[in-house]
Amino acid sequence: MRENGKRANDDSAGAIGEDRAKAGDSDNVAPTGAVADAITRGPVREVALLFLRLGFTAFGGPAAHIAMMREEVVRRRRWISDQRFLDLMGVINLIPGPNSTEMAIYLGYLRAGWLGLLVGGVCFIGPAMLIVMALAWLYVTYGALPQADWLLYGIKPVIIAIILQAIWGLGRTALRGALPVAVALAIFGLYLVGVNELALLFGGAALFGLLRLIERWGKRAARNGVAAALAAPILPLVRAATGKANGAGATGATAATGASAAGATGATAKTAAGVGAVAAAGAVAATVPFSYWTLFLTFLKIGAVLYGSGYVLLAFVQGDFVHRLGWLTDKQLLDAVAIGQFTPGPVFTTATFIGYLVGGWQGALIATLAIFLPSFAFVGLIHPLATRLRRWPVTAILLDGLNVAALALMAAVALQLGLNALVDVVTALLAIAALVILLRFRRLNSVWLIIGGALIGVGAHLAGLAR
């Protein structure tokens, strides 16, 4: 797609690169190797309204959040192309912190500069923080978490449809040719059998880059008649590796589905136990005296070094707040993670809940500020590098590899979430209907589908149709 109006100034100027017309794009999808296109600047108010709404409606975790952002800024508002969005996904995977929040921060920055960076992040985080603070107050006052199963029963299938729509659109841009498809399938399968996501992200990008460079070098050598004898033995190996990776990835994905289903079922049972239990919300006997400064530094450290999902956050928080500081019990920790899972917005607002438990509303604000502060700094620091990655041939190939790996991981997470969400005929039909509607009515706002899914979930429970 082409951006109207004047090109962005200063910070985004480095990303303008070559004219998109040279890339020969079609159907509003940029080719994988295209130079990142410019973004038209807009008012801060536009950024604030978009991310406030997403902050109140973005259920389903980082994969769902990024899918909803892609629908808004690529399909509906056309701020950027799919290729540029993919590049942003690759870049934010390079830095620690919550990916979807960093995407909101980055999109705000590209659209409205430094003020947009702050406004985009705060408006995306703020609604979730307020909702979690209210739930934390209920938890401390009444000793239990409110039940949200009826609503989530219908919302989760719609979220799966939104993620699948985003994967389909982004896949048409990133997965062009046998090599990216083979690498993506291999990463998909390896993730499902338990390989670390960071190893797959960086290892997959490096493998893709190496194979792509060998392939291009061989073609150039053969075309120019230089070192053809050396290139000839290498190219069949690359093709063979590509074919094996393709087969292995597909086989691994099929074989791992059962294991993934078991893992997802276990995670669901653990979360349900945390949500449904009645907590003793009194004071926790601390082995280390409580202080706001310790609270701030602990969450600042977690926000600055944490890669991975909300379950990785669980390990960090348990190590610090349960074992080292002694401010929480394991039961309270599980309830805090459950709150982060079933509220809209960033999962890292688990920190808000914990801050309220140990330090009241002041602790909630301090914990929220501390865990998200590094994300704002990282996005501001990485932008000068990000604008150049697509312009250098070698780093452009590595960025393509990061995009392929990130998309494969997103698809694997979607499968796991789907096994969690599609538990009966009603949820399966709801997901299929939502996906058909999204693909058929491209301008439809997904918020209406989420609201409709929630209402259907309540109706199914009242009618006794839900499991």
Image: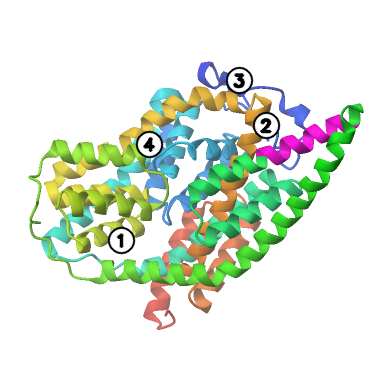
Q: Is residue 229 magenta?
A: no
The residue pinned by badge 3 equals 6
User: In the image, 236: left or right of 129?
Assistant: right
Of the two numbered discs 1 and 3 in the rendering, the one whose residue sits closer to the viewer: 1
The residue pinned by badge 2 equals 2
**Separation of marks 3 and 2 at Cα, in angstroms:** 11 Å
Amino acid under disc 4: Gly
Residue, x 18% and y 66% (percent of image)?
Answer: 144
**Separation of marks 4 and 3 at Cα, in angstroms:** 25 Å
Q: Secondary structure at mark 3?
A: loop
Majority SS type along the magenta span: helix
**Separation of marks 1 and 2 at Cα, in angstroms:** 42 Å
The residue pinned by badge 4 equals 121
**Separation of marks 1 and 4 at Cα, in angstroms:** 23 Å
Bounds of the magenta span?
A: 209-222
Q: Secondary structure at mark 1?
A: helix
**In the rendering, at what x and y percent does residue 84 appear?**
60, 35
Q: Secondary structure at mark 4?
A: helix
The residue pinned by badge 1 equals 338
**Separation of marks 4 and 2 at Cα, in angstroms:** 26 Å
The answer to whether residue 4 is above or below residue 245 is above
